[in-house]
Image (cartoon, helix red, strand yellow):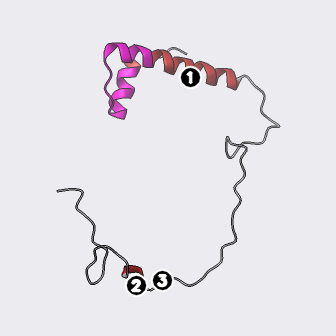
Amino acid sequence: MRIDKTTIKKISHLARLEFDENSAEKMSRDMSQILDWVEQLNEINTDNIEPLTTMSSEVNDMREDISGTHLNHEAALKNAPKRDAEYFRVPKVLE
C-alpha cells in the first residue's frame, strides 16, 4: 500500500504535526513500508497461535502484597527541608 503526500498531510493535520517536503516524503516511505509489512503479516495463518500479552520474554516477579505500618503525617514531615504546618514546601516551577 502506498501512502501519498495528500494522506501524509491529512495525518499530520490530525496529529498536529508539521513536516517540510523532505520529511513528508521520508514519512510517506516509512509509513508505506510499515503498511507493506502488516500486509505480509495478514498472509500468515495464525488460527492456532495464542496472542501475546507482551513482546518481552521477561517475567515479572511480584512480591506478596502485605499491609504494614505507615508513617503518620508528623513523622513524614519531620525531616523535610522546608515545610509549613501541613505540607512539604517546594520551589515554584511555573510562574
Residue 41 rendering spot, x and y as whole percentages? 69, 25
Verify CB contact (< 8 Å) between mark 3 and mark 1: no
Please state which amino acid type lies under the numbered disc 1. Ile
Q: CA distance from mark 3 to mark 1?
A: 52 Å
Q: Residues within 10 Å of mark 2 (few under 14, many from 20)?
A: few
* Amino acid marked by disc 3: Leu
Which residue position holds label 1? 34
The residue type indicated by label 2 comes to His
For disc 3, the neighbor class at 10 Å (few under 14, some 14 to 19, many from 20) is few
Estimate the x, y position of residue 19 in percent, counting from the top left: 33, 22
Residue on which disc 2 sits: 73
Q: Please tell me which residue lies in front, 84 or 54.
A: 84
Q: Determine the secondary structure under disc 2.
A: helix
Left or right: residue 30 versus residue 7 is: right
Marks 1 and 2, the one that precedes in the sequence = 1
Mark 3 sits on what residue?
71
At numbered mark 1, what does the secondary structure look like: helix, strand or loop?
A: helix
